[in-house]
Image (cartoon, coloured by chain):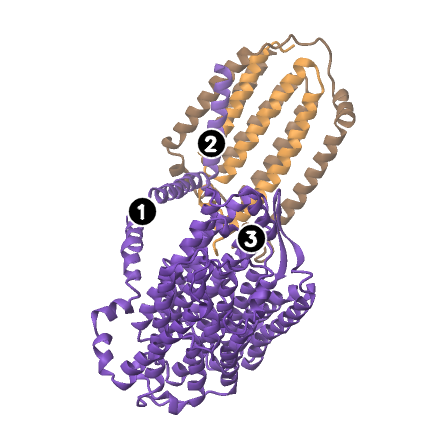
Chain colours: A brown, B purple, C orange
Amino acid sequence: MNFFFYLAAAIALISTIMAISGRNAIHALLNLIISLLAVSVIFYLLDAPFIAALEVIIYAGAIMVLFIFVTMMLNIGTEKKIEKRWLNPRVWIVPSILAALLLVDFILIINGLQIPEPVDETLNTKQVGISLFSTYVLAVEIAGILLMAGVIGAYHLGSQKKKVTHRFLKK
Amino acid sequence: METCIALIPLIPLLGFLILAVAGGKFDRKTAGYIGAGSVGISLVLALIAGALFLRSLPGVSSYSVSLWEWISAGELRADMSFSLDSLSLVFCIVITFVGFLIHVYSIEFMSGDEGFSRFFAYMNLFVGSMLILVLADNILLLYFGWEGVGLCSYLLIGFWYKEPENGYAARKAFIVTRIGDTAMIIGIFILFVNFRTFHLDELMLQVNDKWSVGSPLAVITAALLLFGALGKSAQLPLQTWLPDAMAGPSPVSALIHAATMVTAGVYLIARCHVLFNLAPVVMTAIAIIGALTLLIAGFSALGQHDLKRILAYSTISQIGYMFLALGVGAWSAAIFHFMIHAFFKALLFLAGGVVILVLKEEHDIFRMGGMKKEMPLIFFTFLAGSASLSALPLVTAGFYSKDPILWYSFSSVTGNFWLWIAAFTGAFLTTLYTFRLVFVVFFGETKLKPSFQPGKLMTVPLAILAFFSIVAGFIELPESFGRFHLFSSLAENTLPAVTVRETGYPETLFQLLSALIVFAGIYLAYLAYYKKPSMSESFEHGRIHRFFESGFGFDRLYDVLLVNPLVWLSAINRNDIFDWLNIGLARLTVLGNRLFSLTQNGKLRWYVMSFTIGIVLILTYMILR
Amino acid sequence: MLTVPIETMLIFAGLLFLIGLVGLLTRRNLIFMLMSIEIMFNSAGLVFIIAGRHWKQADGQVMFIFILAVAAVEVAIGLALLLQVYHHYKTLDADSVGKLKDNNQ
């Protein structure tokens, strides 16, 4: 079992790195999908099959497909030269150093944590569902309102009426 | 009665308000009627109040009316309240009466001026402030009116503000009187700190109770108040602003000199006579200052060529007489002279104004002449004023008001021979310069033709004033003939009577002497300026004349002593350290602004970068802690 | 049965987060920036799942579902904005839309 975790983790890391360093948007998105699928394997290994399914359906399915649609709509991919210029090594240095510093911080913090031993119980999706609609029912409502707002906002921003755009972007 | 008192100062202020707010909307006629009418109503009210007051004498010696609470903070309390006693009654009636005539005169005098309604607004404010000053029942309100008068004098002297010189004159008047005002407010503070009240009657009672004669605090306070009075009344050493104040229109000069402003100092001293009585040193100083001022101003008047400046110096000198009278304790004589002076000085200024106006702004008396033939009415009214000013015996009011001052300057307990000599010489000078003016302007050959004849609105006030300049004296006749004391019996309801010492000389002798000196003065003026002009030739172009003309060089002296050092001081302090402090602050702010705008550059990645750096710092800090 | 120590799993999640962060900091293309944000969201959700499993609590998975909802909304709005930016500026360069004001002003 542990082997599968390390394998999935390695696939996820490699494909994520390729996703953020790639020049072609479509290729990067496909890499990202692989990464998400690998993470969903890890979710499965972590006894969360329902979440693994959601990861595949919503992240890899819905959200990434949205990305791919937009990328195709805008016909990006002809800007490889520009991307190359934008991605010269100097740009990477400072963020990488910062990230390395943060990583050191993370490792130090995680090693410093005194995590108690795992509890010997079982957890299944039924409990998640009950928790979601009892303890967190208010949060669910709020998430619903947020999604509604997102729908309306996306509709408003995305509608291509003549000359009518969001006032922040109005020319 | 109470309503009357309250309305006396408020009506002119209302007039000011109407004219100031909506002055541009009225045509000239309406604005003039409002301006003159408000003072006219005030006059009627003052007369009604006076009549009621006289009827209630001797039972009630003062009325007061409180309108509203003006300032109230802890112990400090000053109300908007007025009180009327015989002293303020006299001032009120004179101010409104002379003020009204001047307003009527101004309707015609200013008819060609573009700032017509502005003029009347200022004049109304002037009269209103002066009435507040004399009616105030607490010293803070008095100071309020005092400053109001100062403000209006500034506005009116600089009325023709397009000429820079007028602006300078206005500023000079304001600054010089302000020096006195500062001393006066310090005096008021001392009074308040000691007695915890501003109310005048209460103050005077407490002063009398708690301070002994000649105590240092009393002397200092009296001296400070005196300094304030010197500034307003243009006495030595703060007299220099008055001759320059002639820059304003002639009715303004008349108002400043006759009815308001310069007499405020006299009023203040008379009002605070209890305090001044406790400071004999200051009283002596008042007498000496008065005597010196009347001499210096008399000599200076002799040296002037400008008609209005001659009259200005004569005002200074006449107020010097009033101060002399105050100084020797002849309170009611000073107030009586104030009243008579208001009549004849207003008359002289208004008549002089007519002459200047019809000769198209010609001020030099040696370019005038022969006005007697051209404008007989003006001549006779001017002559009446001049005679009254020179105190022509028996027939003029000036004689009845000035003669007691001469007499008391000798016979009062604090009077002496030298004060009398000064006053006596002053009387001679007065006659000399007055009739020099009369002979030069009205006799001789006509050098300039008047461009028009004055209308009724100008001549009627002149005639009324001339009438009063002659007959107003008969209400107070000296001891030697008549023993008629209408005025002083009224004034002595408020003011103490003069204490006379036994001199061994009869009053009649002094009256005879002053009569003689008047005639001598007239004769000398007749000789030197009419009969044999060659006599005055060498004087008019000599060095002494120049010295007199410059008003004894006080302006130059102050320039050297005060103005130039101050200008020098401010010049070297131009880039002072506090400026640098402020500029530095501004620069720092700009620098901070630049620095922080760098962070708001719209570059998303920059924002994320700063988040990340922040997170790194916080986490590292938490680990290392 | 998975016996990987929890520290290792957390560090793996941290690495994913940092990769997303580096991507956000280096890329100028708005599409890649949005993708990086998604990666970071995902790694945060991963931490919740790991912790939820450790204590056998349902709350971790509940939180992941909320993160999913927020991420969905964020992507929808972000992409809509991105479309508008592209329509106006004909570019997806994040640095060239940083004027913070209208062009007409």
Q: Nearer the viewer, residue B241 or B264?
A: B264
Q: What secondary structure is found at the residue carrying circle 2?
A: helix
The residues tagged by marks 1 and 3 sit, at their Cα atoms, a distance apart of 38 Å
Q: Amino acid at mark 2?
A: Ser
Determine whether, in the image, residue C72 is placed left or right of residue B321.
Answer: right
The mark lying in front, picked from 1 and 3, is 3
Q: Nearer the viewer, residue B539 or B106?
A: B539
Query: Do the residues at pointers 1 and 3 share their chain?
Result: yes
In the rendering, which numbered label is found on residue B484? Answer: none
Q: Which residue is mark 1?
A: B575
Q: Which residue is mark 3?
A: B140
The residues tagged by marks 2 and 3 sit, at their Cα atoms, a distance apart of 63 Å
The residues tagged by marks 1 and 2 sit, at their Cα atoms, a distance apart of 42 Å
- Residue drawn at (49%, 83%) of the image: B458
Q: Amino acid at mark 1?
A: Asn
- Earlier-in-chain disc, 1 versus 3: 3
Q: What secondary structure is found at the residue carrying circle 3?
A: helix
Chain at tag 2: B
In percent of width and height, residue B464 lies at 53, 81
Q: Pointers 1 and 2 in contact (CB under 8 A)?
A: no
Chain at tag 3: B
Q: Which residue is mark 2?
A: B610
The mark lying in front, picked from 2 and 3, is 3
